[in-house]
Protein backbone atom coordinates (compact mmCIF):
# COMPACT_ATOMS: atom_id res chain seq x y z
CA UNK A 1 0.00 0.00 0.00
CA UNK A 2 1.32 3.47 -0.77
CA UNK A 3 1.33 6.17 1.89
CA UNK A 4 -1.57 7.88 0.12
CA UNK A 5 -3.53 4.61 0.17
CA UNK A 6 -2.89 4.29 3.90
CA UNK A 7 -4.15 7.84 4.41
CA UNK A 8 -7.32 7.02 2.42
CA UNK A 9 -7.93 3.93 4.52
CA UNK A 10 -7.33 5.83 7.73
CA UNK A 11 -9.95 8.40 6.68
CA UNK A 12 -12.36 5.65 5.70
CA UNK A 13 -12.05 4.10 9.16
CA UNK A 14 -11.54 7.04 11.49
CA UNK A 15 -13.07 10.03 9.72
CA UNK A 16 -12.17 13.11 7.76
CA UNK A 17 -9.00 15.13 8.20
CA UNK A 18 -8.30 18.71 7.25
CA UNK A 19 -5.83 19.41 4.42
CA UNK A 20 -3.26 20.35 7.06
CA UNK A 21 -3.80 17.14 9.01
CA UNK A 22 -3.54 15.15 5.80
CA UNK A 23 -0.17 16.61 4.89
CA UNK A 24 1.21 16.11 8.39
CA UNK A 25 -0.14 12.54 8.30
CA UNK A 26 1.93 11.83 5.19
CA UNK A 27 5.15 12.87 6.96
CA UNK A 28 4.71 10.39 9.84
CA UNK A 29 7.67 7.97 10.10
CA UNK A 30 5.32 5.08 10.94
CA UNK A 31 4.10 5.17 7.33
CA UNK A 32 7.50 3.86 6.22
CA UNK A 33 6.89 0.80 8.38
CA UNK A 34 3.27 0.32 7.34
CA UNK A 35 3.94 0.73 3.61
CA UNK A 36 6.03 -2.47 3.62
CA UNK A 37 3.59 -4.68 5.48
CA UNK A 38 0.89 -6.87 3.88
CA UNK A 39 -2.27 -4.87 3.13
CA UNK A 40 -4.39 -7.00 5.44
CA UNK A 41 -1.97 -6.36 8.31
CA UNK A 42 -2.13 -2.61 7.68
CA UNK A 43 -5.95 -2.64 7.66
CA UNK A 44 -5.95 -4.66 10.83
CA UNK A 45 -3.60 -2.18 12.54
CA UNK A 46 -5.55 0.86 11.35
CA UNK A 47 -8.87 -0.59 12.44
CA UNK A 48 -7.48 -1.25 15.92
CA UNK A 49 -6.11 2.21 16.58
CA UNK A 50 -6.28 5.71 15.11
CA UNK A 51 -2.77 6.32 16.45
CA UNK A 52 -0.28 5.45 13.74
CA UNK A 53 2.40 4.34 16.19
CA UNK A 54 0.00 1.86 17.78
CA UNK A 55 -1.39 0.75 14.40
CA UNK A 56 2.16 0.12 13.14
CA UNK A 57 3.11 -1.75 16.32
CA UNK A 58 0.08 -4.08 16.02
CA UNK A 59 0.54 -4.56 12.27
CA UNK A 60 4.21 -5.44 12.77
CA UNK A 61 3.55 -7.74 15.69
CA UNK A 62 0.64 -9.59 14.05
CA UNK A 63 1.45 -9.16 10.36
CA UNK A 64 2.86 -12.70 10.08
CA UNK A 65 -0.68 -14.12 10.31
CA UNK A 66 -1.98 -11.93 7.49
CA UNK A 67 1.01 -12.83 5.36
CA UNK A 68 -0.10 -16.49 5.54
CA UNK A 69 2.61 -17.77 7.85
CA UNK A 70 1.80 -20.91 9.87
CA UNK A 71 1.22 -20.33 13.56
CA UNK A 72 3.64 -21.79 16.07
CA UNK A 73 1.31 -23.70 18.42
CA UNK A 74 -0.68 -25.47 15.68
CA UNK A 75 1.52 -25.07 12.60
CA UNK A 76 -1.53 -24.06 10.54
CA UNK A 77 -1.69 -21.23 8.02
CA UNK A 78 -4.57 -18.78 8.55
CA UNK A 79 -5.18 -20.58 11.87
CA UNK A 80 -8.53 -19.41 13.28
CA UNK A 81 -7.46 -19.94 16.86
CA UNK A 82 -4.33 -17.84 16.47
CA UNK A 83 -5.84 -15.10 14.32
CA UNK A 84 -4.58 -11.86 15.86
CA UNK A 85 -7.30 -9.83 17.52
CA UNK A 86 -5.25 -6.93 18.85
CA UNK A 87 -5.99 -8.23 22.34
CA UNK A 88 -3.79 -10.41 24.56
CA UNK A 89 -4.05 -14.17 23.93
CA UNK A 90 -5.28 -14.70 27.48
CA UNK A 91 -7.96 -12.47 28.97
CA UNK A 92 -10.04 -12.72 32.13
CA UNK A 93 -13.74 -12.99 32.62
CA UNK A 94 -16.18 -13.70 35.40
CA UNK A 95 -18.12 -16.93 35.31
CA UNK A 96 -21.82 -16.33 34.94
CA UNK A 97 -23.33 -13.12 33.79
CA UNK A 98 -20.99 -10.39 32.64
CA UNK A 99 -20.65 -8.68 29.31
CA UNK A 100 -16.96 -7.86 29.48
CA UNK A 101 -13.56 -9.47 29.34
CA UNK A 102 -10.52 -7.94 31.00
CA UNK A 103 -6.81 -7.51 30.49
CA UNK A 104 -6.07 -8.58 34.05
CA UNK A 105 -7.80 -10.39 36.87
CA UNK A 106 -7.20 -7.38 39.08
CA UNK A 107 -8.91 -4.80 36.82
CA UNK A 108 -10.71 -2.12 38.89
CA UNK A 109 -14.00 -2.56 37.06
CA UNK A 110 -13.82 -6.30 37.56
CA UNK A 111 -13.10 -6.13 41.29
CA UNK A 112 -15.67 -3.35 41.77
CA UNK A 113 -18.28 -5.55 40.10
CA UNK A 114 -17.35 -8.43 42.38
CA UNK A 115 -17.68 -6.21 45.47
CA UNK A 116 -21.05 -4.94 44.24
CA UNK A 117 -22.42 -8.46 43.95
CA UNK A 118 -21.04 -9.39 47.37
CA UNK A 119 -22.52 -6.29 48.99
CA UNK A 120 -25.93 -7.24 47.70
CA UNK A 121 -25.61 -10.61 49.35
CA UNK A 122 -24.69 -12.57 46.20
CA UNK A 123 -21.61 -14.64 45.67
CA UNK A 124 -19.48 -13.25 42.88
CA UNK A 125 -18.57 -15.70 40.10
CA UNK A 126 -15.01 -16.92 39.92
CA UNK A 127 -12.65 -15.01 37.64
CA UNK A 128 -11.03 -17.28 35.09
CA UNK A 129 -8.40 -16.86 32.39
CA UNK A 130 -9.72 -17.73 28.92
CA UNK A 131 -8.36 -17.68 25.37
CA UNK A 132 -9.27 -14.43 23.63
CA UNK A 133 -11.19 -16.30 20.90
CA UNK A 134 -13.38 -17.85 23.60
CA UNK A 135 -14.12 -14.42 25.07
CA UNK A 136 -14.91 -12.90 21.66
CA UNK A 137 -16.88 -15.99 20.63
CA UNK A 138 -19.06 -15.69 23.70
CA UNK A 139 -20.07 -12.21 22.56
CA UNK A 140 -18.26 -10.34 25.29
CA UNK A 141 -16.84 -6.89 24.83
CA UNK A 142 -13.46 -5.54 25.90
CA UNK A 143 -13.73 -3.85 29.29
CA UNK A 144 -13.83 -0.08 28.89
CA UNK A 145 -11.53 0.39 31.82
CA UNK A 146 -8.62 -1.88 30.92
CA UNK A 147 -8.85 -1.70 27.09
CA UNK A 148 -9.12 2.04 26.68
ZN1 LIG B 1 -2.79 -21.72 15.68
ZN1 LIG C 1 -11.32 -4.49 32.95
Image: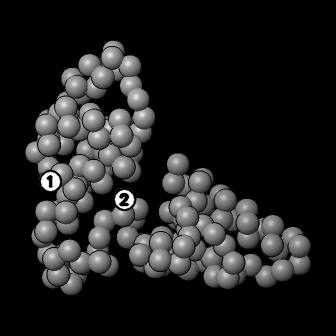
Residue 139: x percent and y percent? Answer: 54, 73
Q: Nearer the viewer, residue 136 or 124?
A: 136
Residue corresponding to mark 2: 86
Q: Residue at x 69, y 78 (%)?
A: 97
Residue 62 in view: yes
Query: Residue at coordinates 82% horizontally, 74% vertically from top-left?
Result: 118
Residue 50 on image: x %, y %: 39, 40
Which one is in front in this view, the residue at disc 2 or the one at disc 1?
Answer: 1
* Ligand 2 within 8 Å, label 2 CB: no
- Place residue 22 in its image quadrant: top left
Residue 38 is tagged as 1
Horizontal side of 39 relative to 112 (left or right) equals: left
Which badge, 2 or 1, is on the more N-terminal residue? 1
Q: How is the image coloured?
A: one colour
Image-quadrant location for residue 125 = bottom right
In the image, 134: left or right of 3? right
Along the line of sight, which residue is nearer the eye, 110 or 18? 18
Amino acid sequence: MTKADILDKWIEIHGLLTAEQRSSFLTKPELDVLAWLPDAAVLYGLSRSPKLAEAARLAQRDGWWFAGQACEPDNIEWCARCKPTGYPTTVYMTQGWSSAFHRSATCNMLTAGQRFVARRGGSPGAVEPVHIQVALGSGRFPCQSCFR
